[in-house]
Image (cartoon, rainbow, N blue to C red):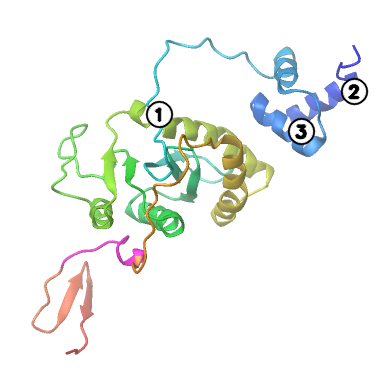
Amino acid sequence: SGRRVPTEREQQIETLYRTRYSGFTAKHFHEHLVRDHGFSWGYTWTKVFLQSKGLLSCAKTRGAHRRKRPRRPLPGMMLHQDGSRHEWISGLDAMDLIVTMDDATNTIYSGFLVPEEGTGSTFQALLEVFGQHGLPLSLYTDRGSHYFYTPEAGGPVDRKSPTQVGRALAQLGVEHIAAYSPQARGRSERLFGTLQDRLVKELALAEIATVAAANEFIRDVYIPAHNARFAVKAEQEGSAFVAITGVDLAEILCVQEERQVGNDNTVVFHTLRLQIPPSP
């Protein structure tokens, strides 16, 4: 056949996969072949070829059909935020990747690595997203202790005892929705499955060795490429993000605690005593 891939090209592709792209999925590998190596044959051929060489296993048979929750029709109606602990950078300990994405389009608005997920990382992500896009109608998260206070493990959240994150979202008028099962966070779970496969390999290809370099790469290179590849069009035109003017988000998306002023005009925060200067 005149359309047959030449034998020397097959050998080159097999060598590339074994030496540089080992572990990549067929689709991820094919994208690099087309973009970086001038490959013009189709994805299906790539997948079948890798399987024939024993480099990829055939996909498992699909299980029972389950109906997914419909997406929100407009960007900004619901955002998902979650963290995934993984060895993202070769040679470094596992870290948490904090991702904020849109339910309507699968667009990633923010992503960065931190030693451990918590209140600070949540505020950092929300400050990035809210500052750039405006306020969403709702935020969908798990029931981690920095998101919600849950009196009993695995039980319902206590809405009357908000965390710092809950207080800030309420102050901004953003509904905070708690997920009660991993299945309820299906889009986030599938996203992290993709990231644990692709992002780790892209960081290794770029020879990233530090957290600072990784976060810069994620922000400037990976997220734009990921959104171009995986984001979908919203069901409706427009946006549900609400513009905010005259509000200092950093004064709201932060830890706020009450203290009583002493007779000497000082307040105590943990072991630190702060003097209040004279004022009218």
Front position in the image: 134 or 163: 134
Residue at 36% of width from left, 49% of height from top? 136
Taking the image as shown, residue 218 lies to the left or right of residue 146, namely: right
Residue at 57% of width from left, 51% of height from top? 214
Q: Secondary structure at mark 1?
A: helix
Q: Amino acid at mark 2?
A: Glu
First to last magenta residue range: 249-258
Gap in Å between the C-alphas at discs 3 and 2? 17 Å
Taking the image as shown, residue 246 lies to the left or right of residue 35, namely: left
Q: Secondary structure at mark 2?
A: helix
Q: Amino acid at mark 3?
A: Val
Front position in the image: 268 or 279: 279
Residue 34 image label: 3
Q: Position of residue 202 (x, y in %)?
A: 64, 41
Front position in the image: 253 or 205: 253
Q: Is 277 covered by the magenta stretch?
A: no
The residue wearing badge 1 is 186
Q: Position of residue 203 (x, y in %)?
A: 62, 44
Gap in Å between the C-alphas at discs 1 and 2? 43 Å
Q: Amino acid at mark 1?
A: Gly
